[in-house]
Image (spheres, rainbow, N blue to C red):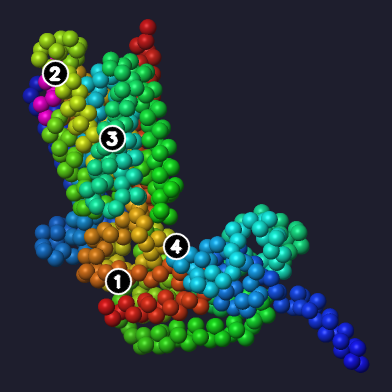
Amino acid sequence: MTAPRGHGLELLLGLLLALLFVSSLFIGSNPIPVWQALQQSLQPDPGVVGLILTEVRLPRTLVALFAGATLGLCGAAMQGLLRNPLASPGLVGSSSGAAFGAVLMIYFGSGGWYQVPIGGIAGSLGATLLVYLLAGRNAASITLILAGVAVNSLALALISLLLNLAPSPYAVQEIVLWMLGAISDLSLQDVAVLLPGTLAGWLLLVGSGRQLDALTLGEETARSMGVRLTRLRWRIFAAVALAVGSAVSVTGSIGFVGLVVPHLMRPLAGFLPGRLLPLSALGGAILLLAADIAVRLFPAGAEIKVGVVTALVGAPFFLYLVIRSRRWAP
Amino acid sequence: MPRLLLILLLLLPALSPAGTPERVVSVNLCTDQLLLLLADPGQIASVSRLALEPESSYMARAARRHPVNDARAEQLLALQPDLVLAGRYSPRPLLQLLRRLGYRVEQLELPRSLEEIRRNIRRVAALLGRERRGEVLIREMDRRIGAVAATFDGTTERPAALFYQPRGYTSGRDTLQDQALRLAGWRNLAAEAGIEGYGHIDLERLLLGRPQQIFTSAYAPGSRSLAQHLLQHPALRRITAGRPMVNVDYRYWICGGPMIADAVEALARAHRR
């Protein structure tokens, strides 16, 4: 299959994303007059509908956009680096490690806002490296998955332990939230917590696409083409830790986006990891925004977590991957 | 004749267990409160461990003078109680065991209105043989609440308010908070939004109600969680035009009792801010 020429696809996805972004601002548990809200939000002292638009819906929309894009992008980068279709932040432990770090900081930290993403970043990096070391370089899918399962369950066990021991009486009930992910009732402060690390991670990945393309030809060939593998590996691990760590410390570990989106986009990217990166970022943002809009369409009072929707979409897709790999098996 | 009198006198202590209990054990925070408020200190054999927590127990100081229990069967049996006070939701197997062994167990409902608070006070007072003390408590509570309510009697302009707790919970119709808010001259937005009892209110609906004052009851000050973080949402401060959220301690609400008067007075004081 050949890649479609030009940037038509990116443009199309970008338009879809913009459309979802705007609808996300207009859809909520209560209908509000949108034009009035827009006008109000531009004034220094907005009325109540302006407040709902800028302080309730905008943060949620921005977080869905950045977290979704991060998960899609990092999934694509990890699959490219490890040349393994099952590598993704959710399976390799980056997300659960990040959630562990963030939980440690939120419930036991001294309260500085910067501590939480730093905890998330450190946890994410730690878990990813642990899986990578356990599985070894050139790991087969099965080894990587096993290592991922081990580290994920360790991280989840530690999260439940921490939340059970946390001084806050509300902590125990938040286990589900960290395991499934949720993005309701966020504020612009949460966006500020998420943004620096996420953007730093994205920036680190800029320009890594060509090297990932070369890597598809095998490590030896890539090396002969001037790709410094150790450096590339560290660069991608650091980028994933920064971006996923910051995003997950605000949203909890939202599953399946990082796994499903690169798979959906790969044929469209002509199987080129480099081109897959921006496409997966766009696709991840689209998926998470759509999932978050779907959550809001449930009747008010039913608090469905966004991670429930992504899992409902992602799990059947994962099964489809399993079935397809069986068909191709010798 | 004097001998008969002597016999009667000797019989009296033996009769008293049937009349007023002398070794009362409470296994529930809310029965602890009424027991500590109403009983003669000598009547109290033990209160629950939660009664010592100053965050949730209004009578925490008085509770320190008594042995505490953890509502465990062997512990309670060792106390040889002649009356066990328990709440509506106290562990059922424990209460069944105590009843089977012949102990007297009385369970109390959680009150949702002033009327139910009065009923509970009268019931515990009667059980303890301290009816007079019960009436004094009720009269004092009614006097203080009546004084607050009287100042708002003629007012037609009642500002909107609501309770907002961690994780977005609020108190709608048929709750103590609802009645207290109205007595203290506020409109309860949560009740107007159709919420029955304790329920969740989403942030957008809260903002659309344009509350002038938001109240909360901190349960665990100093600890942190995502649930508690929600109360710091900047939109909450902006909708009340910078009026800070007012905290009315949890210990006034968690058990409906005469301490509700303190809460009503605190709610009324918030008008002046």
> Callout 4, which amino acid?
Tyr
Tell me which chain the residue with mark 2 is part of: A
Residue A228 image label:
2
Kindly state the secondary structure of the residue where label 2 is placed. loop
Query: As drawn, is A131 to the left or to the right of B82?
Result: left
The stretch in magenta equals A206-214
Q: Chain of mark 1?
A: B
Residue wearing tag 4: B198
Q: Nearer the viewer, residue A292 or A137?
A: A137
From the viewer's perspective, is residue A158 above or below residue B26?
A: above
Give the class, few, some or many, for how many residues have Cα within 10 Å of label 1's Cα (few <14, many ≥20): many
Within 10 Å of the Cα at label 4, are there few (<14), some (14-19), or many (20+) other Cα atoms? some
Q: Quadrant of the C terminus of chain B?
A: bottom left
* Mark 1–mark 2 distance (CA, rounded to whole Å): 61 Å
- Read off the residue under disc 3: A124
Q: Which mark is residue A94?
A: none
Q: Amino acid at mark 1?
A: Gln
Q: Secondary structure at mark 3?
A: helix
Q: Quadrant of residue A293?
A: top left
